[in-house]
Amino acid sequence: MAGVSLKCGDCGALLKSVEEAQEHAELTSHSNFAESTEAVLNLVCTTCSKPCRSKTESDLHTKRTGHTEFVDKTMETVKPISLEAPKAAMEIANHDGSSGSGDAAEVEMVVPDVDKNILLELEAMAFPKARATRALHYSGNASLEAAVNWVVEHENDPDVDEMPKVPANSNAGPPKPALTPEEVKIKAQELRERARKKKEEEEKRMEREREKERIRIGKELLEAKRIEEDNERKRIILLRKAEKEEERRAREKIRQKVEEDKAERRRKLGLPAEDPAAAKPSVPVVEEKKVNSSLPIRPATKTEKMRECLRSLKQAHKEEDAKVKRAFQTLLTYMGNVAKNPDEEKFRKIRLTNQTFQERVGSLRGGIEFMELCGFEKMEGGEFLFLPMDKIDPAVINSAGTELNSAINNPFFGVL
């Protein structure tokens, strides 16, 4: 029996003619073809007359269009295959042969003519020019949708981005589109859906990256906050230790004073002095321990100045405890008024010649200096103490309040 098809030995595809075998070779680079007695299947859709050359192609057509009825016309169209070269190719070979030893390989190949308007639209859709030209050529220049459909079907071809070439003197038209209008619309819809899904996936990926960055920044902020809180706790512990050490030294000073008074009384009464061996460690030992046990503290410089100012005030008037305590309470009231009502000028402006102020604060050495450390300034020729709005520092006011509370409530404050 004569052969009715050509079979590709590389992929097993059945081809109706030498022309189809040549096109198949151009597209796939396959070159192993043999004559076969197996007919090319021809299933025709009864609804739209679409011919399908395999069961897979008919199933795909059914899935896309919903058409399920097909007629097998394989035997009606089968005919012996002609192994002669196409007429156009023979004419080219004969023309080249007349000039000497030239062959078909010397035929000039050029880029096929395609619809320029559709080509521009495809390039505007970000398709490379070679791929767009190839799609238009092999889809028959039918439409934009047909070209997009071809790109979707052949996007994985190794030569999809190579510029197609045809013989310069070939009059053969481009291949006809392989899909019906309904299939072209379905393909275009699938392409749009695929692009939409790809965009959604990219947006989700970017959102995940942004979320990771937010988490990283959040962790860094939490760690910085934790370190800051740890440092603040350590500073407070050191301050408390320093206060306890100051209280201990004050108690030791008082104890020594009591011992001295006791010894003086014994001397006046003519009693013998106590045995020195039974006496407690002397002052130098205490001072030595003070040096060795002093802890490094890290208070604010202005806080230290405030504390020293209050200590100097108390020591300068150590015989007037009630007056000193009243001065501390008055200063605490001033600071509280400023902290609670920073916008009220009456709490930030004090007349220096005011009798009450002079009796409670102004007449005591260190009272006005303490207020200046809190931000108050002399103005109008030294007649007023005024705290400008732009110089109110809540941290300084709070520190002043803390030091004043300590001076009022600590019985050993300023003893040394």
Image (tube, rainbow, N blue to C red):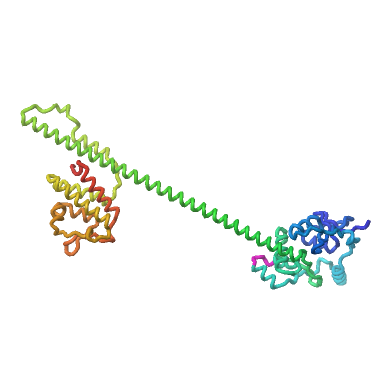
Residue 316, horizontal then vertical, whole percent: 14, 48
- Say which residue appears at 29% left-offset and 50% top-offset: 300
Residue 388, horizontal then vertical, whole percent: 25, 61
Residue sitting nearer the eye, 287 or 71: 71
Residue sitting nearer the eye, 242 or 200: 200
Residue at the outermost right position? 1
The magenta stretch spans residue 174: no
The magenta stretch spans residue 127: yes
- Name the image quarter holding residue 62: bottom right
Residue 111, horizontal then vertical, whole percent: 74, 69
Q: Left of 413 or right of it: where is 200?
A: right
- Name the image quarter holding residue 194: bottom right
Count of marks overlaid on the render: 0
Q: Is residue 1 above or below residue 281?
A: below
- Say which residue appears at 85% left-offset and 61% top-offset: 16
- Name the image quarter holding residue 124: bottom right
- Say which residue appears at 34% left-offset and 43% top-offset: 234
Q: Left of 102 or right of it: where is 397?
A: left
Residue range of the region highlighted in magenta in the rendering: 125-129
Q: Is residue 32 visible?
A: no
Q: Left of 206 or right of it: where is 397?
A: left
**What secondary structure is the stretch in magenta mostly built from?**
loop
Q: Left of 375 or right of it: where is 105?
A: right
The quarter of the picture where the C terminus appears is top left
Q: Is residue 242 visible?
A: yes
Residue sitting nearer the eye, 8 or 410: 410
Q: Is residue 141 above or below residue 317?
A: below
The quarter of the picture where the N terminus appears is bottom right
